[in-house]
């Protein structure tokens, strides 16, 4: 489950406080006396999502916090009633990060606003589709403050979610010369993969052939290709005897079904091989630069990830 229904839209401290006052606390169980975030019959079952009131002198009084799995997700600040602080905890599982991003989107984004939250691995990302460029922004590891604004025009109205940060921002940029050197080093495998994508029969890589091939390749039975890490695929690239197995995996994962036919995306083949090289050689390929605004090119995923242990 990666979606939670009936999450209320609480766009200010006052709205959060009113919702808190209307919500009945749990009368038994581990969370007895605490109040759920979702005040519906089905939503109250999500006892891992709580709306709590805590007093803090440092933050100006009674802070309303939304917690998920005992971790603070959002703080509504009493002295800045139109601002919220969003925590970005590392260590979320993939499914937990997806649920957290879904809750955030419904809580302060989505709807009348154009702001959305998503998850990349165990971290949270933010996007405002009304702004250019429209790339996803990784939230700082220590969290970020957002300003919430409502506007009303002559014919319509809406909400604006503004990411605030005074901390210096850094971005990672690829060293293209080094990247081209890596592509040249693995040129034989790359040419072999591209030629295979053009020469094979795409229909062979539809779902009816997967089970048989998986047994032949030692992958076991299944209806989908096995998930591989960058390191596992890289090891197959290093051994010419396993090139055939690597190509089979690429053809399966880069095929798609459209117009009653199976097709293989040649661009996706190149992209997957580039991803493997970026994960395996991240220290050599990327350089850190100070940037005037939050960087959205996504290269930090290769640097901050688990390297070769990352799924591709």
Image (cartoon, rainbow, N blue to C red):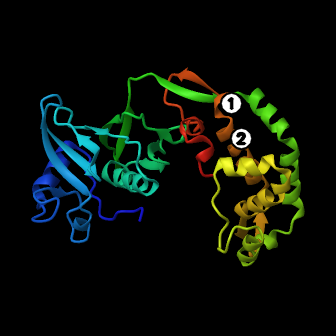
Between residues 6 and 52, which one lies in front from this camera angle?
Answer: 52
Q: Nearer the viewer, residue 62 or 248?
A: 248
Residue 276 in which image quadrant: top right
On residue 285, which mark appears? Answer: 1
Question: Picture coordinates of residue 83 (x, y %)?
Answer: 27, 36
Residue under the image location 56 percent in, 40 percent down: 301
Q: Identify which residue is drawn at 26% across, 58% down.
A: 48
Q: What x and y, as percent, mark residue 8?
A: 26, 57
Find numbered disc 1 in the image and state the secondary structure of the residue it sits on. Answer: helix
Give the quadrant of residue 128.
Answer: top left
Residue annotated with mark 2: 277
- Disc 2 vs disc 1: Cβ atoms closer than 8 Å? yes
Q: CA distance from mark 2 to mark 1?
A: 9 Å
Q: Mark 2 Cα within 10 Å, few/some/many (few <14, many 20+)?
A: many
Where residue 263 sits, quadrant-wise, is bottom right
Residue plotted at (11% across, 65% down): 28
- In terms of sequence position, does the residue under pointer 2 or pointer 1 come before the other? 2
Judge whether 312 appears above or below 127 on screen. Answer: below
Characterize the local packing of mark 1: few (<14), some (14-19) or many (20 or more) Cα atoms within 10 angstroms. many
- Residue occupying the point 73% across, 73% down: 215
Tell me the SS state at disc 2: helix
Residue 60 x, y percent position in the rendering: 14, 31
Would residue 196 appear left or right of 41 to someone viewing this image? Answer: right
């Amino acid at each position: 489950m990666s979606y939670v229904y009936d999450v209320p839209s609480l766009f200010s401290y006052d709205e959060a406080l009113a919702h808190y006052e209307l919500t009945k606390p749990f009368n038994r169980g581990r969370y007895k006396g605490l109040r759920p975030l979702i005040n519906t019959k089905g939503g109250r079952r999500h006892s891992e999502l709580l709306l709590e009131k805590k007093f803090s002198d440092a933050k100006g009084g009674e802070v309303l916090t939304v917690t998920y799995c005992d971790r603070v997700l959002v703080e509504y600040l009493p002295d800045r009633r139109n601002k919220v602080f969003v925590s970005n905890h590392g260590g979320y599982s993939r499914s937990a990060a997806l649920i957290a991003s879904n809750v955030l989107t419904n809580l302060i984004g989505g709807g009348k606003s154009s702001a959305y939250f998503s998850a990349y691995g165990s971290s949270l990302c933010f996007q405002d589709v009304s702004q250019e460029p429209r790339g996803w922004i990784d939230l700082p590891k220590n969290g970020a403050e957002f300003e919430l604004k409502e506007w009303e025009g002559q014919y319509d109205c809406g909400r604006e979610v503004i990411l605030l940060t005074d901390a210096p921002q850094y971005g990672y940029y690829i060293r293209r010369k080094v990247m081209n050197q890596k592509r040249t080093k693995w040129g034989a495998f790359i040419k072999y993969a591209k030629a295979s994508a053009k020469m094979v029969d795409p229909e062979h890589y539809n779902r009816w052939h997967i089970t048989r091939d998986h047994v032949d390749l030692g992958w076991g039975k299944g209806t989908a290709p096995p998930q591989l890490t960058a390191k596992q695929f890289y090891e197959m690239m290093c051994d010419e005897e396993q090139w055939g197995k690597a190509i089979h995996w690429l053809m399966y994962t880069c095929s798609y079904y459209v117009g009653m036919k199976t097709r293989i995306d040649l661009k996706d083949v190149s992209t997957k091989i580039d991803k493997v090289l970026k994960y395996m050689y991240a220290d050599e390929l990327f350089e850190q630069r100070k940037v005037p605004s939050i960087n959205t090119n996504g290269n930090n995923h290769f640097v901050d990830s688990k390297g070769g242990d990352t799924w591709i």
